[in-house]
Amino acid sequence: MKTRTHRCGDLRVEHVGQTVTVCGWVDTKRDRGGVAFILLRDVAGKVQLTFAEEINPELLAATKEVRHEFVITATGKVRERDAENKTTTMASGDIEIAVESFEILNTAVTPAIEVRDDLKCDSELRLKHRFIDLRRRPMQAMLQARAKLLECARETLGGEGFLEVETPVLYKRTPEGARDFIVPSRAHRGQFYALPQSPQLFKQLCMISGLDRYYQVARCFRDEDKRADRQPEFTQIDIEMSFPTRDDVMELFEKVVGNVFKGIREDARFKDQSWPVLSGSEVSPPFERMSYEQAMRDYSIDRPDLRSRDLKLTDLTGWAAGCSFNAFKGVAEKQGLVKALRCPGLVDGFSTGQLKNLERDAKGMGATGLANLKVTDAGLEGGIAKFIPEVEQKAMIDGVGAKPGDLLLICAHEKHKIVHAVMHNMRLLIAEKLGLHDNSKFAICWIIDFPLFEYREEDEKLFASHHPFTLPQDVARVREMAEISRKGGEPHPVARMLRGGVKIEEILALRNNQYDLVINGIEIAGGSIRMHRTDDQADVFELVGIGKEEADKKFGFLMSALDHGAPPHGGIASGVDRLLMLLLGLDNIQDVIAFPKSATGRDLMIDTPNDVEPALLDELGVKMIPKPEK
């Protein structure tokens, strides 16, 4: 085999007259009698090989053995195509190679899926034959963009003095919100490692070690139920820094994001792609900042899609408290929530059946119903309009800023979470109907001032809304509440605080130092300023019900480290897969990972997870329990 001199897609008019050697896969072959054409493909693109009887009849005859996906090498002279034969469908469309010699390096069976850019086939078939799927240009361009994203992130972070540090993959179970994957230890029978959901604790230990600025392209593992934007293993850009303010971390990550957008947009390899990042709106830090409270008030979610920023929700709870419609009034009296969405110009946008389907969807999310009202010159029309006097109708219309021709959708429920879930989904549906979610636009904002705790009423327990290592904004008040909790005799911290005179509303009003970066309604990064003092950390553990014994067992190494002079520190992590999926305008995270798992968590190509031999289980001290029959 001759040494390759050029890649297929790199040849241009300036190479005319040169003798070159190329290698690759046979994309297509056309036999025209006295002449044959092979389109040869490699990672850089395609080039046409021309075999002519007038040049070498034996060589032309030998091409009859060549089939799709054979691997060949060819040597010949680059020549410019005739004007009528030039093509713009590939970068090397102005030239061809007049082949003087070629060799079949390997044959190939007929592939199970076609190697074509516009492939349409079952997703599981693509996963089973991923090594074929990855030969397609869109997949190779995706992997090139993924590498470019990481290159740009590393370039920015390296320039800011960050040190890349690898942290362990054999980890320890910690409460981070999802189920762990566990790994049995042969050397320590009966004990287990856990695969890290994130490097959270180790990156804090890097700061305590005095490294000042750390980052890592980290592999993370979460045993979660599957959906389009999740995989059991994924990659994140993980960052931590010492002595920062919240603004320091946010401004740093804005530089990372800005450089990623710029790097992919300016890369000539991607000119043939139609990704949103290439033609979309300009991305220029600093990015907008919005409080959690405002996001929930206006959009009913803490990751609002601001491409439809003017399509806001209105809280009608105050109006409902004094209205005549008992269903709304009763919810308001029970401290529930009543929210409305003004759908501009859609008074006739839905049929009766479609409105019933919207109500059915709302009920599927736990709501008791979804009211719809049409705004006319005379007031309101619709099923519940007859229960609302004219003066109250006018107050509602004024409250939501509605005009004749608008449609109002209203949800009321005692549980705020249900109303938020319903109205967020309705807002997305209406935004799509109005054509407000253009994928070529990037609406970016920070969400800040999150609640420190979430409250689960059924067992009166608090949970850290981010993670239990996030620094509260009001450390002094948290300390006071923790002291009250420690003195109480009730079984749960909330009950002890309530007995000590602390109101639940005051607990839930506490805010933390968390920040999330949201693009087009997708959270692509999140982080916080951490606690660096053991007394502050112990106070938060106290309020979420983690006692000293449990804290020592689960986090003893961290508490010990904090006791040895930990600096103030904070950081952020960004999901590489989600960010890339957004930039390329794709809908499934599988399409931005080289070798992903299926929707059921299986690797269909190598057929795993699979059984292991009983002898290995015995060596590990693991006993299999048969799955119970249904």
Image: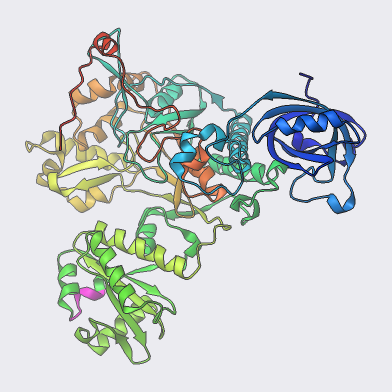
**Residue at 43 percent of width and 46 percent of height:** 516
Residue 618 vs residue 63, the one in the foreground: 63
Magenta residues (range): 319-324
**Residue at 29 percent of width and 47 percent of height:** 510
Residue 339 makes an appearance in the image: no
Residue 113 colored in magenta in the image: no
Q: Quadrant of the C terminus?
A: top left
Q: Position of residue 486 (x, y in %)?
A: 14, 33
Q: Quadrant of residue 521?
A: bottom left
Rendered view: 476 above or below 20:
below
Rendered view: 583 above or below 543:
below
Rendered view: 296 above or below 53:
below
Q: Quadrant of residue 108?
A: top right
Left or right? Give the position of 9 relative to 573: right
Q: Position of residue 496 (x, y in %)?
A: 11, 41
Count of numbered badges drawn on the protein: 0
Rendered view: 602 above or below 301:
above
Residue 569 makes an appearance in the image: yes
Left or right? Give the position of 305 relative to 271: left
Q: Position of residue 84 (x, y in %)?
A: 86, 54
Residue furthest to the left: 489
**Residue at 20 percent of width and 64 percent of height:** 336
Q: Position of residue 585 (x, y in %)?
A: 54, 51
Residue 321 colored in magenta in the image: yes
Q: Quadrant of residue 232?
A: top left
